[in-house]
Structure formats: C-alpha cells, structure tokens
Image (spheres, helix red, strand yellow):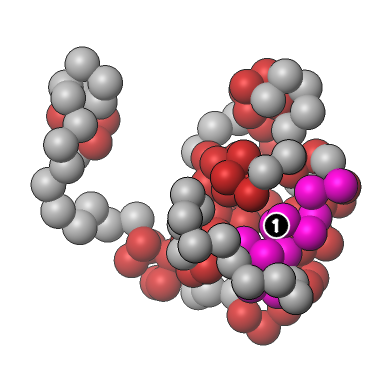
C-alpha cells in the first residue's frame, strides 16, 4: 500500500466511520494492516525515512489526524493507532494546535456540485 493511500486513510479517519473506510479500501484499510506501520511512522515523522514530498499532508496534520482518529469510539482499542500514539509520545499536539488546523484558511474553488457551501463553510 502506498504512502498516499495511508495518508488518505489517516486524514479521513477522524471524520469517517471505520466501517465506511474499511469498505472504501475493500476490507483492507491501511490503519488495520500492520504491514503499513512503516508508512504511518514516516507520515508522522517518527520513522527513519524522509516523509514523502508530494501527495501527503504535513506532519502536524498527520499527527492531529492520528490523535483525533484514536479518540473516536469506533477506533477504540485499535492496535495500530495505540502503537503509533505511544511512539508519538511527547510530540502530540494540544487541542488548540489541532483546532487551528481545522480553521478554513481561505476561499476554495470546489464546485458547489461537489461540496455545497453549507458543508465547506
């Protein structure tokens, strides 16, 4: 599984039900696959490899997504999320830092047919 697939799974995990993401990935969700832990470590900057330059978010976005995903009731007890949180250790973001990442930063150019204004603000 590629780093982009892992990133997409991670960045959606705080907002989309685990069962729905499992279905999107054909029953092979990256966050449930121990073979992908190396990619997640890289995305979180706790691995030994440099983070991919393209097609993935910033380290802070990945860390925020990890923390928020782990707090979802349908993710409770996830071995992958728990292991990654332990490794993240003192590099976790506080709520204020996470909330700052969720504030819209400007106009988007998404057509209303894809994202109506009431959904994207």
- Residue 118 image point, x, y percent: 19, 28
**Foreground: 12 or 93?**
12
Residue span colored magenta: 35-46
Say if 12 sits above or below 51 in the image: above
Point out the image quarter for the C terminus.
top left
In the picture of the structure, the residue carrying the numbered disc 1 is: 40
Is 59 one of the magenta-colored residues?
no
Say if 46 sits above or below 29 in the image: below
**Foreground: 77 or 29?**
29
- Residue 43 image point, x, y percent: 62, 62
Task: Tell whether 111 sits left or right of 42.
Answer: left
- Residue 24 image point, x, y percent: 62, 22
Q: Residue 75: tell me if it is visible.
A: no
| Residue at image coords 50%, 74% | 94
Is 36 one of the magenta-colored residues?
yes
| Residue at image coords 25%, 26% | 115
Q: Residue 18: tell me if it is visible.
A: yes
Q: Main secondary structure of the magenta part?
A: helix
- Residue 2 image point, x, y percent: 67, 43
| Residue at image coords 12%, 47% | 107
Q: Residue furthest bottom?
A: 90
């Amino acid at each position: 599984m590629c780093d982009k697939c892992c990133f997409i799974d991670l960045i959606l995990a705080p907002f989309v039900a685990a069962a729905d993401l499992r279905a999107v990935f054909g029953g092979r969700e990256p966050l449930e696959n121990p073979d992908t832990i190396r990619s997640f470590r890289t995305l979180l900057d706790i691995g030994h490899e440099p983070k991919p330059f393209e097609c993935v978010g910033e380290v802070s976005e990945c860390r925020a997504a990890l923390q928020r995903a782990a707090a979802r009731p349908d993710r409770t007890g996830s071995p992958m999320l728990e292991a990654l949180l332990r490794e993240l250790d003192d590099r976790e973001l506080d709520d204020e830092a996470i909330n700052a990442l969720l504030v819209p930063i400007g106009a988007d150019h998404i057509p209303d047919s894809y994202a109506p204004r009431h959904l994207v603000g």
